[in-house]
Amino acid sequence: MNGYHSAVLLEESISGMNLKKNGIYVDATLGGGGHTLKILESNQNLQVFAFDQDEDAIDYTSKIYEQYSDRLKIFNDNFSNLRTRLSLERIKKIDGIIFDLGVSFHQISNPLRGFSYQHDGKLDMRMNKSEKISAYDIINKFPYEKMRTIFFDYGEERESNKIAREIVESRKKKMIRTTGELSEIIEKSIRSHQKLKAKARIFQALRIFINNEINVLKTTLNDAVNILNPGGRLAVLT
Ligand SMILES: C[S@@+](CC[C@H](N)C(=O)[O-])C[C@H]1O[C@@H](n2cnc3c(N)ncnc32)[C@H](O)[C@@H]1O
């Protein structure tokens, strides 16, 4: 565990990647760099290209992994730009790529990022802070129908209609600004013992929509498969 994030399935995922001595690897979701470090340490000749759209991850890893800068290149970018970024580096093929999806411990535990119903903070949830639409915009400006669809499609929340309706009623009285306020509204809108699960599902749905997670993953997985060398490995941790 570094202070930023504790990499999951570290040994399993890296051993499954079957790392080659002089291989070229991509860490699509750098975070605190746990997987990247493990790959770099496996052999001194191997190269890593790492992506993260969150500048907090870049600030953290750029400093602590400076000693690897001759064979580690970090991009503050969405992994959907992988092909362009690699071709600018004159890399046509890679030997492996890892996607460790979701949010980092740093993101989920920081109330200022607004990812969690467990920490009261500003409604946000953008991994890339320069994206235009945040959770605040959806909750305060999106019409009922659009909100309901997001909750249902990305959170599979059965009570999506009740929750979206309650949000619309609440925001008529005053803007909904914090994760705490949104949590209370979700709790209020459903009677069942599923309140906690409903909060988790709604927060997940908002995060997936805001960060366009499904579309970006679909296209990038295709791109990744096309640039893998024969025998190359692709690992996805969800
Ligand atoms: C679960 S964490 C990865 C943790 C990392 N494996 C480690 O060992 O610390 C996921 C990271 O991926 C980043 N991320 C998620 N989707 C991304 C995308 N489409 N493009 C670039 N980075 C992304 C997030 O900002 C977050 O820092």
Image: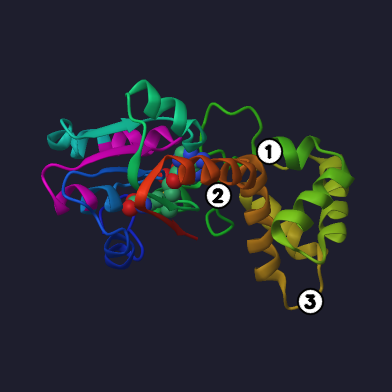
Image location of residue 209, percent across then percent down? 67, 44
Q: Earlier in the sequence, mark 2 or mark 1?
A: 2
In front here: 111 or 80?
80
**Residue carrying label 1:** 136
Indicate left or right for 132 with 60 as reference: right
Q: Residue furthest front?
A: 230
Label 3 to label 2, Cα distance in Å? 24 Å
Q: Is residue 112 visible?
A: no
Mark seen at residue 207? none
Residue at 67% in and 61% down: 201
- Choose top left, top right, bottom left or bottom right for residue 10: bottom left
Q: Is residue 161 magenta?
A: no
Kindly check if marks 2 and 1 are in contact, taking CB atoms under 8 A apart as contact.
no
Q: Which residues are magenta?
A: 39-61
Label 3 to label 1, Cα distance in Å? 26 Å
Kindly check if marks 3 and 1 are in contact, taking CB atoms under 8 A apart as contact.
no
- Please, what is the three-letter code of the amino acid marked with disc 1? Tyr
**Residue carrying label 2:** 115
Image location of residue 237, percent across then percent down? 45, 60
- Secondary structure at badge 3 equals loop
Kindly check if marks 3 and 2 are in contact, taking CB atoms under 8 A apart as contact.
no
Residue at 46% in and 35% down: 53
Q: Is residue 165 visible?
A: yes
Q: Earlier in the sequence, mark 3 or mark 1?
A: 1
10 Å neighbourhood of mark 2: few (<14), some, or many (≥20)? many
Q: Earlier in the sequence, mark 3 or mark 2?
A: 2
**Residue carrying label 3:** 192
Q: Is residue 53 magenta?
A: yes
In front here: 77 or 81?
81
Image location of residue 84, percent across then percent down? 45, 25
Indicate left or right for 85 with 188 as reference: left
Q: Is residue 133 above or below residue 46?
A: above
